[in-house]
Image (cartoon, rainbow, N blue to C red):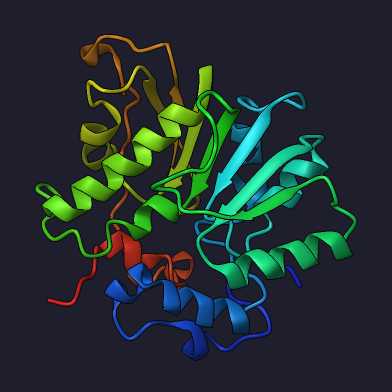
Amino acid sequence: MENLSGNPVESHKGDVLPASASAYLDPHYWDDRFSHEEHYEWFKDYSHFRHLILDHINPASSVLELGCGNSQLCEGLYGDGITELTCIDLSPVAVEKMKQRLISKGYKDIQVLEADMLDLPFANGSFDVVIEKGTMDVLFVDSGDPWNPRVETVDRVMSMLRQIHRVLKTHGTFISITFGQPHFRRPFFSNSEFTWSTEWRTFGDGFHYFFYILKKGHRMSESAECTERIDMPSISPYHDELDSEDYIFRTNIDDA
């Protein structure tokens, strides 16, 4: 079932691609997509950033994955001994199919719940680690000018971050795997509401995916944060690695 190239399995790409990028914000689109699609990995599979993950998650960590969809991220984590896992998705179709898949593979300890990441149903300080891969990027698909995103986009992203900050333990870690470059993500991550520090790493061939690490209770001065230098290569839309749906988020397409 796994396709390491990041392409859909048992589904033709034309069957799942939306008519416009703004459709990614429509829950009905995801229900329909997940009813047909068995597996898709946004922004590479676990093997590409496993070395980064294991620096910040250990077998004793309680982990919440946001927007699990039909990814195999939780299975990768479980295989590395991280068994206290909770996965959520807004789509009831994705949740039911994920439950059945995990049971069929013997991963009975992983909890899968239908939940909204903008209104998480967990108590304060519930998790050591919260992780999202491509889920936040969906909130930016109709953001307009990336340097000055729409008010609605800002509100959604800040709601998501507030919920993550709330459910993290005192010294918990938020991991965000994204196309979002530091100059676009930093205004959100560094908001004065949050007590976390912000750093990042990169992975990927030909161009970069970003791996952000936000450590709650460790906030540094603004000038000391996000200091890693990134030499961004030029992007060619014909690069092999861009032959996937991921590129939609790179180019910030909207309906205009």
Residue sitting nearer the eye, 243 or 66? 66
Picture quarter with the N terminus: bottom right
Q: Is residue 19 visible?
A: yes
State which quadrant residue 113 falls in.
bottom right
Q: Is residue 64 above or below residue 223?
A: below
State which quadrant residue 248 falls in.
bottom left
Q: Identify which residue is drawn at 68% across, 84% down.
A: 10
Q: Is residue 170 above or below residue 16?
A: above
Q: Is residue 63 left or right of residue 211?
A: right
Residue sitting nearer the eye, 33 or 155? 155
Q: Identify which residue is drawn at 31% across, 24% down.
A: 226
Picture coordinates of residue 68 (x, y %)?
A: 58, 56
Q: Identify which residue is drawn at 25% across, 33% down.
A: 186
Picture coordinates of residue 223 (x, y %)?
A: 21, 13
Picture coordinates of residue 243 (x, y %)?
A: 46, 73
Q: Identify which residue is drawn at 12% across, 54% down.
A: 150
Q: Is residue 136 left or right of residue 13?
A: left
Picture coordinates of residue 222 (x, y %)?
A: 22, 15
Q: Is residue 36 above or below residue 95?
A: below
State which quadrant residue 256 falls in.
bottom left
Q: Is residue 50 left or right of residue 185?
A: right
Q: Is residue 181 visible?
A: no
